[in-house]
Image (cartoon, helix red, strand yellow):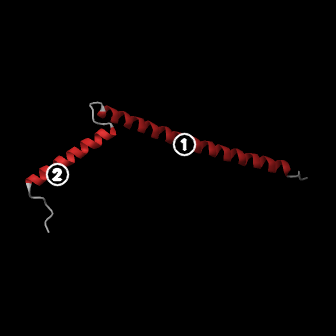
């Protein structure tokens, strides 16, 4: 069964319906005016900035956790050394 649309009138009708549907979607999203391209670029920049901040914050959190673990290990070793009775 051939699924290609042969009737040019039907093709034009489908293209027009798709175009109108896309226009309605842009209007609903508030992206129908001449500022839309700039708005999208600004949103993309904002999203990229957010991702960079998030990555940096997660990296910083990881470093803080490593420092905490190292300090706890050193404290535990110091307490162990203090609790061990002297020999000799």
How many marks overall?
2
Residue at 76% from the left image edge and 49% from the top image edge: 76
Label 1: which secondary element: helix
Q: In this view of the protein, which residue sits in the foreground, 1 or 13?
A: 13
What residue is disc 2 on? 14
Rendered position, 3 above or below 84? below
Residue at 67% from the left image edge and 47% from the top image edge: 69
Cα gap from disc 2 to disc 1, whole angstroms: 50 Å
What residue is disc 1 on? 59
Residue 55 rendering spot, x and y as whole percentages: 50, 42
- How many neighbours does mark 2 have within 10 angstroms: few (below 14), some (14-19), or many (20 or more)? few
Choose the circle earlier in sequence order: 2 or 1: 2
Residue 77 rendering spot, x and y as whole percentages: 76, 49
Please identify the quarter of the rendering in which residue 6 is found.
Answer: bottom left
Residue at 17% from the left image edge and 51% from the top image edge: 14
Residue at 71% from the left image edge and 49% from the top image edge: 73
15 vs 49, left or right, is left
Please identify the quarter of the rendering in which residue 37 is found.
Answer: top left
- How many neighbours does mark 1 have within 10 angstroms: few (below 14), some (14-19), or many (20 or more)? few
Q: In this view of the protein, which residue sits in the foreground, 35 or 52?
A: 35
Give the farthest residue toward the right.
88
Q: Nearer the viewer, mark 2 or mark 1?
A: 2
């Amino acid at each position: 069964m051939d699924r290609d649309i042969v009737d040019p009138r039907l093709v034009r009708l489908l293209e027009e319906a798709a175009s109108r549907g896309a226009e309605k979607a842009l209007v609903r999203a508030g992206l129908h005016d001449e500022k839309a391209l700039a708005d999208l670029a600004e949103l993309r920049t904002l999203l990229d900035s957010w991702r960079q901040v998030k990555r940096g914050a997660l990296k910083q959190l990881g470093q803080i956790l490593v420092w905490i673990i190292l300090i706890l290990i050193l404290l535990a070793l110091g307490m162990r050394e203090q609790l061990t009775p002297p020999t000799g």
